[in-house]
Image (cartoon, rainbow, N blue to C red):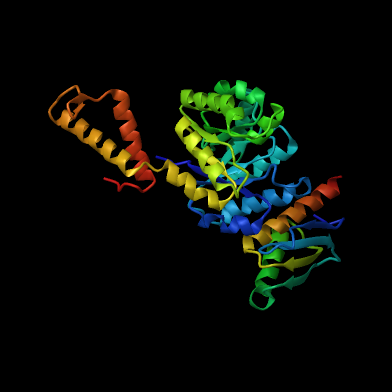
Amino acid sequence: MNLLRTMMFVPGNNPGMIQDAGIYPCDALMFDLEDSVAQASKTDARFLVQQALMHLDYPQRLVVRINDPSTDLGKKDLEAIVPCCKAIIRLPKTETADDVQQCADYIEKLEQRRGLPVGKTQMMAAIEGPEGVLNARSIAASSPRLIGIALGAEDYVTAMKTTRGAGEELFFARSMILHAARAAGIAAIDTVYSDVNNEEGFIQEVELIHQLGFDGKSIINPRQIKPVHRIYTPSEKEIEKALAVKAAIEEANRRGLGVISLNGKMVDKPVVERALRTLALAKASKALQED
Amino acid sequence: MEVKRTVVSGTLESSDIMITLEKGNGTIEIELDSTVMKQFGSSIRQVIEETLREQGIDSALVIARDRGALDCTIRARVQAAIAKAQEENAA
């Protein structure tokens, strides 16, 4: 199981942060060439991230957020990052399936031109406006390269003429993105929580998105890693229950029974699926040893 | 390629290097100021010169102010400066 509980933003023009980013235990690092980089520093950031991908080792999954790929800047980002073969390309402000397909077409041209395996470069799409939210389903299904879609809430709430609050303002967008991702069989990543000093508010938000079913959250500070991982790691009780279901499955298989029962009750298929997912999550997050 | 106009890349932040690339007089001349001059001065000069020559530049004045940058950061900053010089030449 590839975990995507935490995807940490790293500004693309900060060498100190880029070289230290590998020490943090987040699941993914997202080097940003877009909003966190001043217009005058776009070229600097592009070469810096490219060199970091080529010469530094990171234990995390790597993602690069590029500039709008329909612009000259975005195309230059793709030309620099795709040949490194190290990072998932994250599209900003995706509004339609066509946005993803056009970027995928350009990536394919680059792969062909550089003699790289065609189709190997993966993509993520950030949905940051009402148009994108309403098109979430077609965006999620737009390319086999797409491994996930993510909500970008700051632009979204601005476009919706509101501000970030307790979460009511994001309920529709989160639900749309989650359903679109699940229907397409890809990951759903929640938006950042910008008030780094409000740990209580952050934890409440992570509990909410975990309960909704998101795979993880974009984060902006290493301090946010631990609370997310704690909430996303199955509890001992959940693991024990899942192990009991697994034992019941094995017992039923051994005895050639079609029906699985536990403590005298029949175990339904969704219960089995949830138990297996809990065990996979527990193993991936090292709460349970591999078999 | 010839550097026609002065361009700058990088910053003076820790772990970074600021590269100012200017028109040269037929050779590569590097003026280096570094917080780790004693230990890494010659290595930094070598990375700068190699990166310039790889990109086909044999004549330039480079003013480099290093704040403890890794080799990959030095290369990135020199490459960015060259890209900016190319854009200036094309403009």
Question: Foreground residue, A13 or A234?
Answer: A234
Q: Residue furthest bottom?
A: B38
Residue drawn 67% across the image and 31% down it: A157
Q: Is residue A190 left or right of residue A241?
A: right
Residue A141, horizontal then vertical, whole percent: 53, 23
Residue A63, horizontal then vertical, whole percent: 56, 43
Q: Is residue B41 left or right of residue A121?
A: right
Q: Is residue A269 left or right of residue A192?
A: left
Q: Is residue A275 visible?
A: yes
Q: Is residue A87 visible?
A: no
Question: Foreground residue, A116 or A135?
Answer: A135
Q: Is residue A288 left or right of residue A255?
A: right
The relative height of residue A136 versus residue B82 in the rendered view (above or below) is: above
The relative height of residue A193 versus residue B68 in the rendered view (above or below) is: above
In which quadrant of the rendered image does the N terminus of chain A lie? top left
Residue drawn 53% across the image and 25% down it: A175
Question: Total label count?
Answer: 0
In which quadrant of the rendered image does the C terminus of chain A lie? top left
Residue B1, horizontal then vertical, whole percent: 80, 54
Residue B28, horizontal then vertical, whole percent: 78, 67
Question: Foreground residue, B73 or A217?
Answer: A217
Q: Quadrant of residue A20?
A: bottom right
The relative height of residue B58 versus residue A108 in the rendered view (above or below) is: below
